[in-house]
């Protein structure tokens, strides 16, 4: 009898523990759900945070799905690209949320419970998407009265929402670019011939309003700034540390006068060239860094091309097709060919013989000789104000496209 009573007590205890556990989980889930969607007392305003990507204008002006997809891609609202799906992402929750609700009825508002039912989403998933839209500044919410939060398009129209977005984005970028002035330590050095970039990558820029420095001691003011601007990638991870390779490389660019080649970067910073190259290209995409031809290494490139072509094709080819007779006078030709015959041509000989030749003519000579000028990276301006203006100009181009697409969407809805 005692044995059965003991089993009954143990079973009652287990049941009580199970019930209490279920009640605890239910209370926690309900609390999270209410905090996210209902509780007006505990709601807080979201920090402005958005990732902007330069995308070509849509090829069609009447396809509402294409225009909505352009907005989603430009604001990086969906991490997984729609091209990987059969419907190009047009049946995704964010696409439907914008197309069927916010853009279609800009003067209305919707509570979170109704949106979750209509989009067949869990509260956590819906909260994630709505939080991204609220952080971007396009969508707002109200906690008036008791009940669910009601979400709406800011300004009562897409045009007004884009105007709000434009003002906030430009203001935050302008304010935060001021940090470069405190870190700037390079001289406005210009090369003999400045060749502008010919293949500027599309702009990819993070815009996050200023906030206090993290208290873990792992980041610095510069590393946090770089992470906010997207210079550390979409998921920084260890790169957000103050001593990461990305931060070290950017510090070099802030203090270096001449352009930095990939070989020089590998010597200064302990890291593989492939990784350094990817980091530099990420810097270029933000508009803060540019890649230019190393005109300061023109003599070295000409020296290497002359030796290679003289050994391969000989003196006659260099005179006629190599550009010697076309671009150099007799004295310059003889001085270079004499040293080439002896096998003693040096960079100093090339520099001395071509001292009176214009940099543009030297570039043409290098091209005729089949040589290649090395490329280097530097800050995209001689002063920090120039870098800020470069970023703002490229950002303005994206914002003008957003205004144009918003006009097209409103014309279709009308």
Image (tube, rainbow, N blue to C red):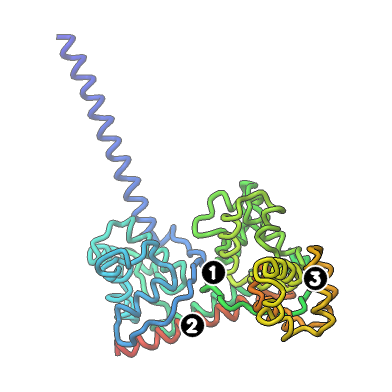
Query: Position of 349 compared to 43: left or right?
Result: right
Q: Which residue in the protein does label 3 denote?
A: 187
User: Quick check: can you spot residue 389?
Assistant: no
* Image quadrant assignment for residue 141: bottom left
* Image quadrant assignment for residue 126: bottom left
Are circles 1 and 3 on residues that touch, CB within 8 Å? no
Local secondary structure at mark 1: strand
The relative height of residue 40 versus residue 189 in the rendered view (above or below) is above
Q: Which residue in the protein does label 1 denote?
A: 205
Q: Horizontal and vertical percent for residue 241?
A: 62, 50
Q: Nearer the viewer, residue 280 or 48?
A: 280
Q: Which residue in the protein does label 2 denote?
A: 163
Are circles 2 and 1 on residues that touch, CB within 8 Å? no
Q: Which callout, 2 or 3, points to the residue nearer the camera?
A: 3
Residue at coordinates 76% horizontally, 76% vertically from top-left? 191
Quadrant of the image for the N terminus? top left
Q: Between marks 1 and 3, how big is the CA–CA gap? A: 26 Å
Q: Horizontal and vertical percent for residue 359?
A: 75, 81
User: Quick check: can you spot residue 162?
Assistant: yes
Q: How many neighbours does mark 1 have within 10 angstroms: few (below 14), some (14-19), or many (20 or more)?
A: many
Residue at coordinates 82% horizontally, 77% vertically from top-left? 334
Local secondary structure at mark 2: helix
Local secondary structure at mark 3: loop
Q: How many neighbours does mark 2 have within 10 angstroms: few (below 14), some (14-19), or many (20 or more)?
A: some
């Amino acid at each position: 009898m005692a044995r059965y009573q003991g089993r009954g007590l143990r079973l009652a205890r287990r049941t009580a523990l199970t019930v209490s556990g279920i009640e605890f989980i239910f209370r926690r889930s309900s609390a999270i759900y209410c905090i996210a969607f209902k509780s007006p007392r505990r709601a807080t305003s979201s920090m402005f945070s958005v990732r902007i990507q330069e995308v070509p204008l849509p090829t069609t002006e009447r396809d509402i799905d294409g225009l909505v997809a352009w907005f989603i891609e430009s604001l990086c609202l969906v991490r997984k690209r729609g091209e990987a799906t059969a419907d190009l992402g047009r049946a995704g929750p964010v696409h439907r949320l914008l197309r069927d609700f916010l853009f279609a009825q800009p003067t209305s508002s919707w509570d979170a419970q109704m949106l979750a039912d209509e989009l067949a989403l869990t509260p956590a998933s819906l909260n994630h998407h709505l939080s991204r839209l609220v952080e971007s500044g396009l969508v707002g919410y109200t906690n008036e009265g008791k009940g669910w939060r009601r979400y709406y398009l800011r300004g009562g129209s897409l045009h007004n929402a884009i105007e709000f977005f434009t003002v906030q984005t430009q203001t935050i970028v302008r304010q935060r670019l001021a940090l470069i002035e405190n870190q700037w330590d390079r001289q406005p050095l210009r090369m003999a011939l400045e060749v502008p970039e010919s293949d500027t990558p599309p702009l990819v820029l993070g815009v996050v309003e200023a906030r206090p420095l993290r208290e873990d001691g792992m980041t610095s003011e510069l590393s946090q700034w770089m992470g906010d601007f997207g210079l550390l990638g979409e998921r920084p991870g260890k790169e957000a540390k103050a001593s990461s390779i990305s931060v070290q490389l950017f510090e070099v660019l802030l203090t270096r006068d001449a352009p930095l080649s990939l070989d020089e970067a590998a010597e200064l910073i302990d890291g593989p060239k492939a990784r350094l190259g990817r980091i530099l290209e990420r810097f270029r995409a933000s508009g803060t860094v540019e890649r230019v031809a190393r005109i300061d290494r023109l003599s070295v490139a000409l020296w290497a091309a002359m030796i290679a072509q003289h050994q391969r094709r000989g003196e006659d080819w260099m005179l006629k097709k190599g550009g010697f007779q076309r671009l150099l006078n007799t004295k310059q030709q003889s001085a270079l060919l004499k040293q080439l015959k002896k096998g003693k041509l040096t960079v100093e000989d090339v520099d001395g013989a071509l001292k009176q030749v214009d940099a543009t003519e030297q570039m043409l000579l290098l091209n005729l000789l089949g040589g290649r000028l090395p490329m280097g990276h530097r800050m995209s301006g001689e002063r920090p104000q120039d870098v800020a203006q470069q970023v703002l100009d490229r950002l303005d181009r994206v914002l003008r496209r957003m205004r144009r697409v918003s006009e097209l969407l409103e014309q279709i809805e009308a």
